[in-house]
Every structure is written in structure tokens, then in C-alpha cells.
Amino acid sequence: MSQLSSLIGVDFEVIQQTVSEILGTQVKEVDFIGKNKHCKIIGIKLLDGVEVILRLQLKSLPSYVMETEVATMRYLTTKTTIPVPRILHFNFDHDHPLGVYMLSEKFEGIKLSTIFSSLSAKEQDFLVKQIAHWSIELFKHRFDTIGSLYIKEEHDNLEFIVGPISHPLFYGEDRGNLSLNRGPFHSSRAYFKACQQRELDYARTQCPQDTSDTYQQNVADVRLTVERCMSLLGRVIERCRGLDEDDPTFNEFSLSMAELDLGGIYVAPDAPSLILPTWLTHSLSDSEESQSLCRERLTTIFRKSIQSIDGPDSLFLKALDMEQTRQTIDHICDYNAFTDGFLLLPTLESLIATLPGEEDIEGLQELLNPHTLEGRAARIALLTKGTHPLSLASEGLLDNIVAY
């Protein structure tokens, strides 16, 4: 094993042998591209010049993480026009010498987010219209439950089913060892309640031993914050309308579009309007104020494109414009309450105080008190985007806090 192989914990010789057997051709080069929270990414060049990508899932993760990714990619390939890489091979057996992995095509390209601002208005408009088309295409795929896609193969027929949800907050940071309710869920309310219980269960496992009294007290304080946050979340879930079958318009579920953004789309360097097949990876940075007019124009184009595809009474647009409480709950459920409770608490308190018909004016005035750290954070959160209002409110004193 080479020094690099030892350093990254991957045996390049085993990779060469495995890929050669799968593809029936010799491997010329093996390069380590990088690592993220889910996998190690290996670039492989074959003897004929073709390049492929090998993604080795981290051994600490359950195999269903890769299973659902493979299923989602194959679903998009077989049932939509959205371009994704062709999967060449996959393995879900942890006992394999390489562990759980996926081998797929590689396409050269650059992230659209890195060049979008330099494109002409015509090119930008074209790309936004394409994204609008994909958004509607995804939105029209309906499911009866909330969860993740899995493949059920019977008699050579490819069948997709919705199974337990594969989300980092349900398996990361040793959560995979907890007996959490991972679904599938038959209503939004059931899903949100599972997220609430997930955070409570995880926080209650955080009981550090052989540490200082100060550290243990800090952890105890964080657990109390989580308990407070989840208590408030439970109240919001109970009072929010339309989370069960009582909303026939929105009681069906569609594919999540969280990663369909400029940071998850690759384009050909010499033809930016040509979108290449690639897996979608979330990375969109919201920046320059000078781009606000451009964003307004593109938002208008996006909405008009949706209307031209789906009609003036588009259910997709109605979902975008609907009452915000459900969207806020969904966003809150994507946070780690143990690390981000200091952000969630003022958000939930303001949400409770502004529920339709239950407005608490005095409570809001106290919550938004500019003379307190929490009040400044709440005010900033109302006027800005991002996940660091407390850092802004404390004038840099909390810069060491890492938010989700």
C-alpha cells in the first residue's frame, strides 16, 4: 500500500483490481479527489482514457445511506429528463474490501454558481427557465408517504418504494445507533413529531463522563435548551393547520428540491447554457447586494416559466406562496437542536407568539428587546438571511460558534 493510500485509509491496489473486474479494462491512474461527511471520492482513469468516479461511503455510516442515493439517481434517470451520471456499479455490503461504494460516470464541468453572475442576461434566463422546468417535473411525482427512495427488484422489474428516511440528522453523530422513528410517515405532522423526538432522544444521550464540572454543567444547560426548543416545537406542530389529511390540496408528497440550485448544477465551460449530467450537491452562496435587481428579474422569469408550464393556477406556485408556518417548521426540523438550540429558541418563541389568532404582543415586545442579546438576534433574524444572527448580535463575541 502506498503512502497516500495509508494516509487516507484506502487501498489503491484493491481499487484497481475491483474496478478492472467490474469494467473489464485496466486502470491507468487512481487519484484521491476529496472527502465529505458521507464518503471518500476517488478519481479513476482507465487505460482507454475514460474517467470514472468511485465514491466510498464512510464505514461509520449505515449502508442505507448509499442505497437511497443509488435509488434516487436511478429514479431520476428512468422517470425524469433531469441529467444525472450513469451508475456503473454499486455495493451495499460492508464486508466487501472496499466497503459500501458506488461507481459512476464522470463528466467534466464547472459549478454554475461560480460563473452565473458573469453570464449574459439571455444565458441566465435560459438556465432559470430550465430549472423551472425541472422543478415542475419533480413536483409532479407524487408519493403517499414521507421517507427516502429504495429499490425493490422483483423478476427483473425495477420498482421504487418509499422507506425509512435517510437524512444526516437521523443517522449522523452516532444517531444511527438510536432507536429513532425513521418512517416512512403518512403525514407531515407525524414526520415533524418524529423530528422533535429525534432531537430529544439524541440530547438525552449526551452525558459526558470524566470531564470537568463546568463542562458537564454546560452540557446540562444545552440539554435544557433542547428540551425547551422541542417543547415549543411540539406546541407549534399541534397548532399548525393542514399537517394531516385535513388539507386535500397539499396532503400528497413530492420529491425534495433542496439540492436543485446553482451550486448543484454543472455546465460545460465553453457552453454555459449546456447543463451536464451530474449529481446534485447543495452549495449556493447568497451574496452581493448589487445582484438584487438581477435576482428580482430571474425570480419573475422563474415564476412566469412555471405558469407557462403548469398554468396560472399552478399548485407549485401556491405551495411557494402558502402560509409560512409549515415551511418554518420544516426548516427548523433540519437543524441539530443540540448544537443550534441557541438559534432555534428565539425563532420558536417568535413563531409561538405570532401564530394566527394567538398573537402575544407583550411577549413579542419582550422577545424583540434590543437591549438583550436574544432580542438583537431575533431582530436580525427577521431582517437577514443566514444562520449566524447571534454572532452579529454579539458583535463578533460568538464567532467561534459553528452553526448548522
Image (tube, helix red, strand yellow):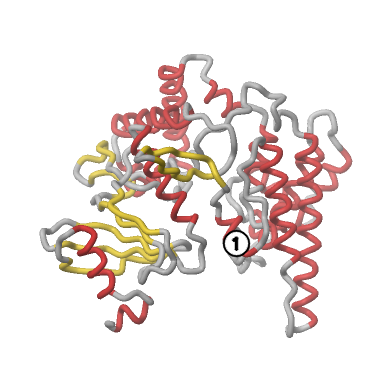
Q: Position of residue 134 (x, y in %)?
A: 39, 31
Q: Position of residue 243 (x, y in %)?
A: 70, 32
Q: Which residue is painted at 28% across and 52% down in the image?
A: 88
What is the tally of numbered marks visible in this picture? 1
Q: Position of residue 31 (x, y in %)?
A: 26, 69
Query: Does residue 212 lie above or below 355 as drawn?
Result: below
The residue pinned by badge 1 equals: 176
Numbered disc 1: secondary structure: helix
Classify residue 66 as left or right of residue 395. left
Query: Does residue 139 lie above or below 55 as drawn?
Result: above
Of all residues, the one furthest to the front in this rendering is 155
- Image quarter of residue 120: top left
Quadrant for the C terminus, please.
Answer: bottom right
Q: Amino acid at mark 1?
A: Gly
Query: Does residue 102 lie above or below 12 as drawn?
Result: above
Q: Which residue is painted at 81% across and 62% down in the image?
A: 224
Q: Position of residue 163 (x, y in %)?
A: 55, 45
Classify residue 82 as left or right of residue 380. left
Question: Which of the pair 370/88 is nearer the observer?
Answer: 88
Of all residues, the one furthest to the left in this rendering is 48
Q: Which residue is painted at 45% across and 33% down in the image?
A: 293
Disc 1 packing (10 Å; few <14; some 14–19; many ≥20): some
Classify residue 31 as left or right of residue 221. left
- Image quarter of residue 41: bottom left
Of all residues, the one furthest to the right in this rendering is 362
- Image quarter of residue 395: bottom right
Quadrant for the N terminus, please.
Answer: bottom left
